[in-house]
Amino acid sequence: MPIAPSAKLWPVAPPVGQNRRYLRRVTARPDAVETPLRGGNTTHRVVRVGNTVRCPATPASVTVHAFLQHLNDVGYSGAPRTLGFDDLGRHVVEYVEGPVLMPFVHPEPQAALRRVGRLVRDLHDAAEEFVIPQDAVWNVVIPPDHSGLVIHHDAAPWNLVAGTRWVLIDWDNSGPGSRLWDLAYAAHGFVPLAPETSVEQAVDGLAALADGYGLDDAGRLGLCDLLIPRIMSMYGLLLRGHQEQTLPWCRLWDQGDGEIWLRHAQQTGRHLEKIKSRLLHGG
C-alpha cells in the first residue's frame, strides 16, 4: 500500500526543515534504461534503473528516507539502502535481487516464519533509536492501536524479497505505530490467517513467528488480541474507500479484496480462543 489516496506527487523532493540534512542528489546516466516494476496493489510509476529503484516522491518521502538512513546506519540488513533523490525528485533506493514469495511458501515453513519474526523484531529494536524529526511527515493510512516507535505498517509476503538477504521493501507507509500492530499484520499475511489454514497450522505458524520475535506470554496474548482488529482495519480502509470512491481502495474493494479480508477476520474469530489457548499453553 505505497501511496495514500490523498498524497500528491512532488516534482522534486521537498527539502523541509530538519529533514533537509537527509537529502542527497542521485544523478542518472543520460542513457540509463528505466524498467517499470509491477506487482504492488497500489504502486504507480516505480521503475528500476540499474541497481536502483526509483519511486515518485510524496510529502512523506524525505522523512521515510531519514528513517531508512537510520536503519542503514545502525546495520539493519532487512531494509534497502536509501540513496537520496534523483534529478526528477524521485526517491532512490537499492534494488534487491531475489524472489517475492507470494503466497509465502517455503520448504521449511516454521524456520521461515521464525526468520520473519526475527526480521521484524530486529527492525523494531533498530527503530527504537530513531529520533523522529520535529517536522516529520508520515503517510500512515490506517491509525494504529498506539504509537510507540516507527514501524513498517505493511510487513507482508508481497513486500519481502527473500534472496541472500531477506529485505522488506515498500516503506512509503512506514510511520509511528506499535510492535504488536506490525507483528499482527505480518501474522495475517505470512502464517497466513485465512480459511484454507487449519487451526493447527495457524497455531504452529503463530508460535514460530512469536518465537522468532522473542515474545513472552504477555506478548503472545497481546498479539492474539490484536489479530482481528488488525485484519478488520484493512477491511475498514477498503470499505471507506468504496463509500467515498477513493482510489486505489475503491478499486481493490471492487476486485473483492474487502470480502477477502472480512472472511479472514471471521475465520480467525471462530477459532481465536483455541488458537490463544494452544499458543499460550500448548493445550
Image: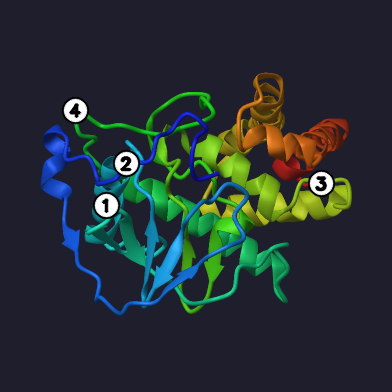
**For this view, does 283 lie left or right of residue 146?**
right
Given residues 5 and 105, the one toward you in this image is 5
Residue 194: which numbered mark, if any?
A: 3
Report the mark closest to the observer, 3 or 1: 1
Tell me, yes or no, whether the two marked residues, 3 and 4, touch with CB atoms within 8 Å. Answer: no
Report the mark closest to the observer, 2 or 3: 2
| Residue type at numbered disc 4 | Gln
Residue occupied by mark 4: 134
Tell me, yes or no, whether the two marked residues, 1 and 2, touch with CB atoms within 8 Å. Answer: yes
Q: CA distance from mark 1 to mark 4?
A: 22 Å
| Residue type at numbered disc 1 | Gly
Picture quadrant of residue 62: top left
Residue occupied by mark 1: 89
The answer to whether residue 277 shows anywhere in this view is no
Q: CA distance from mark 4 to mark 2?
A: 21 Å
Please report whichever mark, 4 or 2, sits nearer to the chain's N-terminal start. Answer: 2
Please report whichever mark, 3 or 1, sits nearer to the chain's N-terminal start. Answer: 1
Please give the name of the residue rendered at 31% of the width and 60% of the height, measured from the top-left corner: 92
Q: Residues within 10 Å of mark 4 (few under 14, many from 20)?
A: few
Please give the name of the residue rendered at 54% of the width and 45% of the height, measured from the top-left corner: 154
Given residues 23 and 189, the one toward you in this image is 23
- Give the quarter of the figure containing the C terminus: top right
**For this view, does 180 lie left or right of residue 207?**
left
Report the mark closest to the observer, 4 or 2: 2
Residue 10: which numbered mark, if any?
A: 2
Residue 30 position, x and y percent, is: 25, 75
Q: Say above or below: 126 vs 97.
A: above
